[in-house]
Amino acid sequence: MKIYIASSWKNKEDVTRMAKHLRGFGCIVDDFTDDSQGRFTFSLEDLENILDNDRIISSSSHARVIKAMNHEMSKRAFQQDKSMIEWADVLILLLPCGKSAHMELGYAKGLGKKIIIFSHNGFTMDDFEVMYGFADLITYSGLELFDKLREWSSD
């Protein structure tokens, strides 16, 4: 089973740990934080440093954001993430995360992928989202997550 983990760079250690467990379970995993197998990786901080060193720094924050979104690094990361979502059988949304990971979830669901929303810290009402109804599983249990993957593997 091919897994795409959608999350935040702030969760780098959790993403790495989850990828390791999933691989131990026999899954093929795309870990967006791991460049050891040719994955293009960069963080917003990396991009901001490049823009800071750019000789043409706009004083407008609007122009700076647009420049960042149109930067070659952003375009390359987008294409790779999109390609890996298309490749995957399952997308796991590892909470907490931001807008990008949630957009990845929506794209994956639109492609007919299986969706798991996982929070190892559990959930509070602050986590409530009606649109999480797209998920095939919402859990904070690693056992439940692996049981669902096992079930899907046998289908």
Image (cartoon, rainbow, N blue to C red):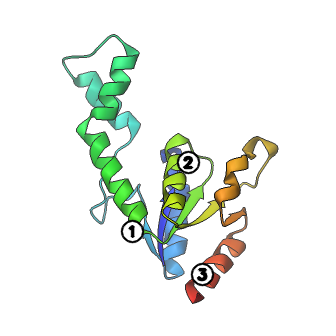
Q: Earlier in the sequence, mark 1 or mark 3?
A: 1
Which of these two is toward me, 145 or 36?
Answer: 145
- How far from the left and from the top, in percent, is residue 82? 38, 55
Residue at image location 18% in from the left, 18% down from the top: 55
**Which residue does the numbered mark 3 point to in the structure image?**
152
Residue at image location 34% in from the left, 21% down from the top: 64
- Please identify the quarter of the rendering in which residue 154 is found: bottom right
Q: Is residue 146 above or below residue 80?
A: below
Direction from residue 7 to residue 58 in the image, left or right: left
Q: Earlier in the sequence, mark 1 or mark 2?
A: 1
Direction from residue 51 to residue 22 in the image, left or right: right
Please rate how many residues cluster around mark 3, counting C-alpha atoms within 10 Å: few if below 14, some from 14 to 19, many from 20.
Answer: few
- Please identify the quarter of the rendering in which residue 14 is found: bottom right
Which of these two is toward me, 155 or 77?
Answer: 155
Type of residue at label 2?
His
Q: Are marks 3 and 2 in contact (CB under 8 Å)?
A: no
Q: Is residue 39 above or below residue 27?
A: above
Direction from residue 146 to residue 104 in the image, left or right: left
Type of residue at label 1?
Trp
The mark found on residue 28 in the picture is: none
Asked whether residue 112 is in view, the answer is: yes
- How far is mark 1 from mark 2, CA to CA? 18 Å
> Outermost residue toward the top?
59
**Which residue does the numbered mark 1 point to in the structure image?**
87
- How far from the left and from the top, in percent, is residue 13? 52, 55
The mark found on residue 102 in the picture is: 2
